[in-house]
Amino acid sequence: MLGVQPVLLWSDALIFALLLGGGVWLGLALRREYWRVALRQVASNRAAALCFGILCLYGAVGFLDTLHFRVVSPAAPAGGNIQSLLDLLCRRLAQQSEKTYSAPFATHLYTKETVFLPDGRQVRTYPRLRYGGRHLQVPQQRWPDIRARLVEGLGWGLGSGVVLLLGLLGLLAWGRRRGVAAERLAAWRRRGLGVVGFLTAVAVLVAEVVVLSAGYHILGTDKAGQDVFYTALKSVRTGLVIGTLTTLIVTPFAILFGVLAGYFGGRVDDVIQYIYTTLSSIPDILLIAAAMLIFQVGLTAKETVISADERLVYLCLIMGITSWTGLCRLIRAEVLKLREIEYVQAADAFGVSRATIILRHLVPNVLHIVLISVILRFSGLVLAEAVLAYVGIGVDPSMQSWGNMINQARLELAREPVVWWNLFAAFVFMFGLVLPANIFGDAVRDALDPRLRTQ
């Protein structure tokens, strides 16, 4: 009898802790009118709301890839390979591997091979794929079949949108029966239509992907025959982990040292400035490369998934230690201004302890800078992973990441014919994450910075 054994990796535990901490902070922050006004301003920005929805879509993919487990059977009581819920949902994509490269929506391999014909002759030709387009009787049926699948996926997506719209109409009807004010019903209708429109677009996208990937490799296959779309999906978690966990490591260092340097000044300020000036003077690539060479000793003896995950956590830790200096400077400068404000001077005159002044007056008033910097830094960290993988000091080569895809594409672009879809897939998925993160970060900055308030 088969059983499921949950597996908790280091990065999984950190992600769950981050989600819990973020939920607690959001609940506490919404008790203050300042944060509630900022949230309403961000929600009223259509571009920011759309980008937040896209980020939530990426987050959902990453969360599905965070729920790890083993399948345990009597024949293998120790369990099989570590899998995630995303692997289970995309099992067909993972298992339908070809022999080598194939282009998007192709029915034949990308390179010629020697093929034996039924009459015994040998010819050099492009062999048919084992899975991609295998349902077609003749390759000429490919484009009509793709158009039919697009129409089918559109129908499923629009059907889901109709169901959501009926649900919204039911909610509005229930509100009228309960005597909800007309202004609130108008707000429900306006926001509900936006949510239904976005979810319908997501449903159409998911339906198209499911229908098309059932018969084709929509982004082709790589050198090992693995579906590139599946690899790009698996890389989402790696990008999110590097962006979020590194930021989680950066923030406490920056807040602690920035507040201490700005508030106490004197020798404390001099020591902290010396530390972050020294760190800033050393190229990050050299520090990360040296630290990774030290940390990765001993990882090879462990299971591949576990050692790759530990290397990912080490990479986040190292990147966090080397990148807290910029935010620390910003917080120090803000605290230098805040400590001269009247309510801080009054608290000091009444004998309030310095720890209380820091926790009650200084730290809450620099959180808007921290949040803005965190959101804007996220996209930079996602791009940094690609650079580190390109020079060979990024995540483990066995772990799917956009950086590893780009590193592999470096050699593929030099061959003839050019294999371009690996780089294209990494670019599209990175662009789809980084651009919404930057737009959403700009909206948060406008909402939290008093000098940029639009309402």
Image (cartoon, grey):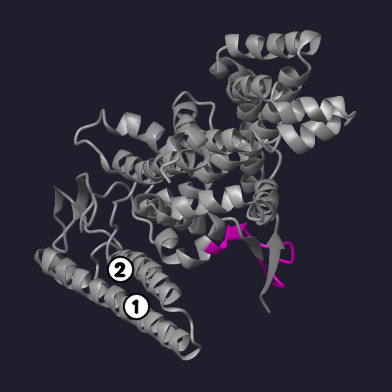
The numbered mark at residue 204 is 2
Element assignment for label 2: helix
Residue at 34% over, 29% down: 410
In the displayed structure, would residue 36 be above or below residue 161?
Answer: above
Name the residue rendered at 34%, 77% in the picture.
160
Q: Amino acid at mark 2?
A: Val
Q: Is residue 375 visible?
A: yes
Tell me the quarter of the image containing the N terminus.
bottom right
Residue 79 within the segment the image draws in magenta:
yes
Give the quadrant of residue 446. Answer: top left
**Left or right placement of residue 322 versus residue 437 in this view:** right
Magenta stretch: give its range.
Answer: 71-85
Q: CA distance from mark 1 to mark 2?
A: 8 Å
- Horizontal side of 396 relative to 129 (left or right) equals right
Q: Amino acid at mark 1?
A: Ser
SS assignment for the magenta stretch, majority: loop
Return the residue at label 1.
Answer: 160
Q: Position of residue 407 (x, y in %)?
A: 40, 32
